[in-house]
Structure formats: C-alpha cells, structure tokens
Image (spheres, rainbow, N blue to C red):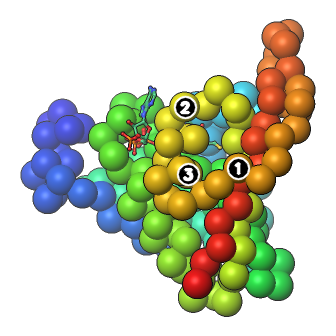
Amino acid sequence: MMAWLSELWSGGTAAVEPATLRDATTLARIHGASFHRGWGEGEFESMLTERNTLVHRLRSGRKTIGFSVSRIAANEAEILSIAVAESHRGRGLSGNLLMTHLGHLAGRGVRTVFLEVEENNRPARRLYEHAGFTVVGRRERYYQQGGGEPLNALLMRRDLS
Ligand SMILES: CC(C)(COP(=O)(O)OP(=O)(O)OC[C@H]1O[C@@H](n2cnc3c(N)ncnc32)[C@H](O)[C@@H]1OP(=O)(O)O)[C@@H](O)C(=O)NCCC(=O)NCCS
C-alpha cells in the first residue's frame, strides 16, 4: 500500500512511542539518509541504553518512520537529532513527534530545552518555531558540509512549564 494511503488507513496519524534496542538498525538507517554524518547502529544502541538519553520512534502501521533523541543533564535537555524518513516528510507528522518528546522531557523534570539547527533548514526551523522554540544565538560557519561553504547554526531554546 502507498505510504500516504496506509497513514490515512491508520487514522491519518502516526504513533509516537519510546524506542527500544530493537529499533537501533532502523533508526541508524533513517539517520544516515537524513544527515551528512550519519550515526551508526552502535551509537544508537548506546543512546538507547544510557539513562540520560531519551529516544522516541515515530511509527506508521508496523513501520518506524522517524525518531527524536535528546540528552538530559539535570533540569536541562538538548535535542540531539530529529528526523522523519524522506518518503513520509511534508505531511505534518513531525509536530506530534516533537511535542510528545517534549512532554516526556517535562515528565523527567526538564525545565529548559536547547537545540541547534542549520540556518537554511526551513522545515526544521518551522517545526521548532511552531513548537514554541525561539532563537537565542547564532554560530557562524558552524557546520562543515563536505567540500562546500560552512553553514551557520542557530541555537534555539524553549522553556517547559
Ligand atoms: C525537519 C523534519 C523532521 C520535518 O519533518 P516533516 O514531517 O517533513 O515536517 P512537517 O510536514 O511536520 O512540516 C514542518 C514544517 O515545515 C514545513 N515544510 C515541510 N517541508 C518543507 C520544505 N521542503 N520547504 C519548506 N518548508 C517545509 C511545513 O510546511 C511545516 O511548516 P508549517 O507548519 O508552517 O506548514 C524533516 O524534514 C527531516 O527529517 N529532515 C531531515 C533531518 C533534519 O534536518 N532534522 C532537523 C535537524 S535540526
């Protein structure tokens, strides 16, 4: 069944739930296809076992199609990575993933969340702005992209109450 049809079939939404060690391979595959420097399966396995790391998966039917990862230190957290598999992007699925993730961070006692985003990454910036994040800093030429020009990073923050 086509991806959008099966999403419609399952109620038009996708489930957001805690990821487990069994998800490591799939999450590494989605990460590798989404970012310049992909994280390997072993890196996901470590993050899925560390107590201070929170990992959620986005699931449509039986398929894992995205994830969010953050690291908690005392009452602050940093979102390390969030991605939706390319064939499922642009359908508004990321908002639920991020908001559920933030809800769990709040449940763990986190009061402030930070993240970094590449300045020209429109979908990610829209996602974070809609989720209540504001820009609190800018790092020039922060991301080195292959042979290209380094790209700027924005530091964003949101307080959880
Ligand atoms: C960022 C990402 C998770 C967003 O997931 P998504 O499910 O495609 O996003 P959504 O459909 O929920 O759309 C989020 C917002 O981006 C906008 N958007 C989506 N695709 C877009 C595009 N190609 N260009 C510009 N805006 C776009 C949407 O319109 C929406 O904004 P709106 O609410 O104002 O309409 C996804 O694009 C992704 O995995 N990207 C690669 C990894 C990445 O860059 N992660 C963030 C690192 S900081």
The spot of residue 59 in percent (x, y) is 36, 58
Q: Is the residue marked 1 within 8 Å of ligand 1, measured from its CB?
A: no
Q: Residue 133 appears in which quarter of the rendering?
A: bottom right
Looking at the picture, does residue 140 appear above or below residue 52?
A: above
The spot of residue 153 in percent (x, y) is 79, 37
Residue pictured at 54% horizontal, 45% vertical: 83
Q: Is the residue marked 2 within 8 Å of ligand 1, measured from its CB?
A: yes
- Farthest residue, direction top: 147
What's the residue type where badge 1 is placed?
Val
Looking at the picture, does residue 20 appear above or below residue 58?
A: below
Residue pictured at 70% horizontal, 42% vertical: 117
Q: Earlier in the sequence, mark 1 or mark 3?
A: 3
Q: Secondary structure at mark 2?
A: helix
CA gap between label 3 and label 2 equals: 10 Å
Q: Which residue is mark 2?
A: 122
- The quadrant of the rendering that contains the N terminus is top left
Q: Can residue 24 be seen?
A: no
Q: Which residue is mark 3?
A: 128
Q: Which mark is residue 30?
A: none
Q: Residues within 10 Å of mark 1 (few under 14, many from 20)?
A: some
The spot of residue 8 in percent (x, y) is 13, 48
Q: Secondary structure at mark 1?
A: strand
Q: Residues within 10 Å of mark 3 (few under 14, many from 20)?
A: many
Q: Which residue is mark 1?
A: 135
Residue pictured at 55% horizontal, 51% vertical: 128
CA gap between label 1 and label 3 equals: 10 Å
Q: Earlier in the sequence, mark 3 or mark 2?
A: 2
Nearer to us: label 1 or label 3: 1
